[in-house]
Amino acid sequence: MSVLDAEDVRRIALSLPETVEKRRWGHPTFDVAGRMFVTVPDDQTSFAVRCPRLEREELIAAEPEKFWVPKHEAGSNWVRARLEALEDADELRDILVDSWRQVAPPGLSELSADVGR
């Protein structure tokens, strides 16, 4: 199995309804309805997604090799995930869809579990 990369993040993010790519802070970000739901920062070995803080702490505690939060983002509702730690493209898709649903307008966010496939 090959390691997932930033192009996999881009491909899956852009497959989600009404997603647009923008450049912020010198790297790609992806929005739906004008709200960012994923970004690929720094060296492109990870990505950041929206995640409610309570869930974020549980994710990090359960899989610290996969999820973490940089100190400068500690007060945010974002979590980072290491691409090399993901099982496969389906796991990446699930993470991106979850983040997308947090900001998508109600009509879009109520789409079935098959969104992005």
Image: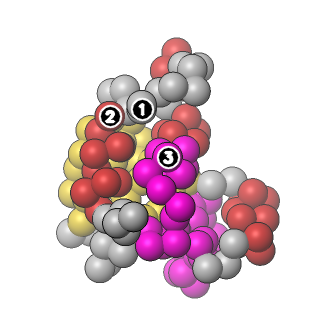
49 relative to 44, above or below: above
Task: Say few, some or many: other residues with alpha carbon within 10 Å of mark 1 (under 14 / 14 to 19 / 20 or more).
Answer: some
Between 15 and 36, the one lying in front of the other is 15
Q: Are marks 2 and 1 in contact (CB under 8 Å)?
A: yes
Q: Residue furthest bottom?
A: 71
Which of the labelled discs sits on residue 116, or is there none?
A: 1
111 relative to 7, above or below: above
Q: Position of residue 94 (x, y in %)?
A: 54, 44
- Kindly report which numbered mark, 3 or 1, lies closer to the viewer in this rendering: 3
Does 8 sit left or right of 22 as displayed?
A: right
What is the distance, in whole Å, between disc 3 and disc 1 at their CAs? 10 Å
Q: Position of residue 73 (x, y in %)?
A: 55, 74
Residue at x 47% of width, y 63% of height: 48
59 relative to 17, above or below: below
Residue at x 35% of width, y 43% of height: 12
**Magenta stretch, residue numbers:** 66-95
Q: Mark 2 points at which residue?
A: 15
Q: Is residue 39 visible?
A: yes
Q: Name the residue under label 3.
A: 90
Q: What element carries label 1?
A: loop
